[in-house]
Amino acid sequence: MAKTADKTTDTIENAAFPTFDASNATDQFRAVAEKGVEQSKEAFSKLKSGAETTQKALESTFETAKSAGNELSLKTIAALRANAEADFSHLEALIGAKSLSEVVELQTVFLRKRVEMTVEQAKDIQAATAKAAEEVSKPVKQAFEKVFKELKVA
């Protein structure tokens, strides 16, 4: 039993305990913190860039929507004006009619012209609306495409 006690004492005396070096831990902690700060700055930069791009796209979209709305309003007003002028011209012609057959003929011609005019006005407004929708969605579409392209790269 004495041999075992001697071996235990000898082993304890020769055993090396790991030492804790505080300067290494501080350096490692500093490196991790600096890396975290750098990654945060990079993420913030990307976020800021994305926000600026989105803001520009929205501003462009609102300006385009405003001009498209103005164009549609002007087309609508022009159509209403043309309709009112046609109505007054027809009314003057009806007042000057000498017979019932002339009234029927004027009415028939007027209705045919009004239908043609209405179809043309609808085509013009539809074309302007389609153009406006395309122009309004263009900046937002480009912004989304850019963001998704950047996300695929990252």
Image (tube, helix red, strand yellow):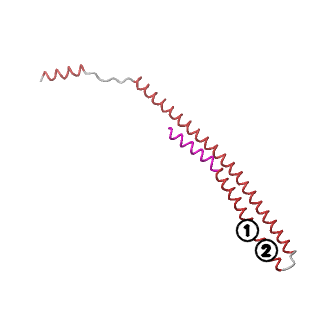
Residue at left offset 48%, top offset 30%: 35
Q: Quadrant of residue 91?
A: bottom right
Does 130 sit left or right of 152 as displayed?
A: right
Q: Which mark is residue 115?
A: 1
Secondary structure under tag 1 reads helix
The dominant secondary structure in magenta is helix
Could you tell me the amino acid type at mark 1?
Answer: Val
| Image coordinates for residue 108, horizontal then vertical, percent | 77, 74
> Magenta segment: does it hold 147?
yes
Residue 125 quadrant: bottom right
Magenta includes 68?
no
**Residue at mark 1 to residue at mark 2: CA–CA distance:** 12 Å
Please name the residue shown 80% across and 69% down the image: 87
Q: Tag 2: residue type?
A: Gln
Choose top left, top right, bottom left or bottom right for residue 9: top left
In the picture shown, does residue 118 fall above or below 70? below
Q: Which residue is mark 2?
A: 107
Q: Is residue 89 left or right of residue 64?
A: right
Location of residue 51 in the rendering, given as x and y in whole percent from the top left corner: 59, 42
Bounds of the magenta segment: 136-154
In which quadrant of the rendered image does the N terminus lie?
top left
SS class, disc 2: helix
Q: Name the spot of residue 140 as percent of width and height, x first.
A: 61, 47
> How many other residues sit within 10 Å of disc 1, few (<14), some (14-19) or many (≥20)?
few
- For the point 79% across and 77% down, the residue is 104
Query: Which residue is depicted at the point 62% across and 50% down?
Result: 137
Q: Position of residue 56 (x, y in %)?
A: 64, 43
